[in-house]
Amino acid sequence: MMNFDAILKYQDEDEKYIALQRKIVSTDENKKFIAAKKAVQDSAANLKKAEIKANEIKEAYKKLEEDILKLSTELAEIEQIDDNVVDIDEVSYYEKAFNSISDRTDEIRKKTEQLYDTLEKLRRYIENEKKNYQSFNVALNSAKAAFNEVLKSHASEVDGFKKRLNALEAEVNDAEAMKMYNALKTAKKLPAFVEFVPGTTVCCRCGMEIESGVKAKLKNSGDVAECSSCGRKLFVR
């Protein structure tokens, strides 16, 4: 049979420990620490995105350089042929080809200028974001130091809770009971174990009607059953 007295002691102590943890995380120091950490993470992510964008622009530049090389080759070929052309139709054909190369060259020039402007803006953005990143890191280190002081001020209290909980867990001496407790704790359903008095009809925690099948399992001392509404463990002392 489960040691319900020990389980309830553990549960009560753990709820007090959870209350202390909530108190610690709700301090201004922790809120500032979390905000500072997020600022650093966001800045790092921004820099990463900017670096990816810069690499994309560099790749686009390479592509334009390749296109320019192709056009230069085409132009050289036309210039060689042009010296020997006497037919009017051929002259017209090569003039159109030359004009096409000229138009494509202008288009590449415009794209190059656009890429340059974008890259220059990106360079300034990265430069500024790097300064922000350094500033955010300074703020993070300061906030972390302040929060560590809060942790230090509660260190002996936290240590006391841990020692008492370890001792009480040993007193419970029931792996299955602790497994049930921790599962409900994770599901944020504390208290996990709730005493049931035979003859009552509702769960004294959630207040919902207990099904007849569940009540049938809760008749004798040591009986344990799950509330079908809230999932907590009902037990008979």
Image (cartoon, helix red, strand yellow):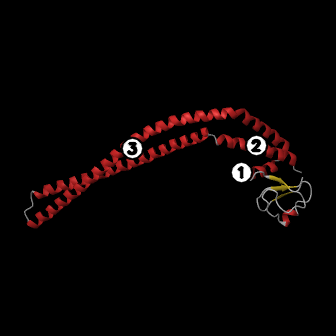
Q: Amino acid at mark 3?
A: Tyr
Callout 1–callout 3 Cβ contact below 8 Å: no
Q: Is residue 185 above or below residue 32?
A: below
Residue in view at x 68 percent, y 41 percent: 23
Q: Residues within 10 Å of mark 3 (few under 14, many from 20)?
A: some
Q: Is residue 3 left or right of residue 128?
A: right
Q: Earlier in the sequence, mark 2 or mark 1?
A: 2
Q: Are marks 2 and 1 in contact (CB under 8 Å)?
A: no
| Residue carrying label 3 | 125
* Relative height, residue 127 to residue 181 (above, below): above
Q: Is residue 107 left or right of residue 129?
A: left
The residue carrying mark 2 is 16
- Labels 2 and 3 touching (C-beta < 8 A): no
Left or right of residue 47: residue 113: left
Q: Between tags 2 and 1, which lies in front?
A: 2
Residue drawn at the location 23% of the way across and 57% of the way down: 104
Residue at which label 1 appears: 186
Label 2: how many Cα within 10 Å (few below 14, some 14–19, many 20+): few
Q: Count residues near mark 1 (Cα–Cα under 10 Å), then give few for <14, some for 14-19, many for 20+.
A: few
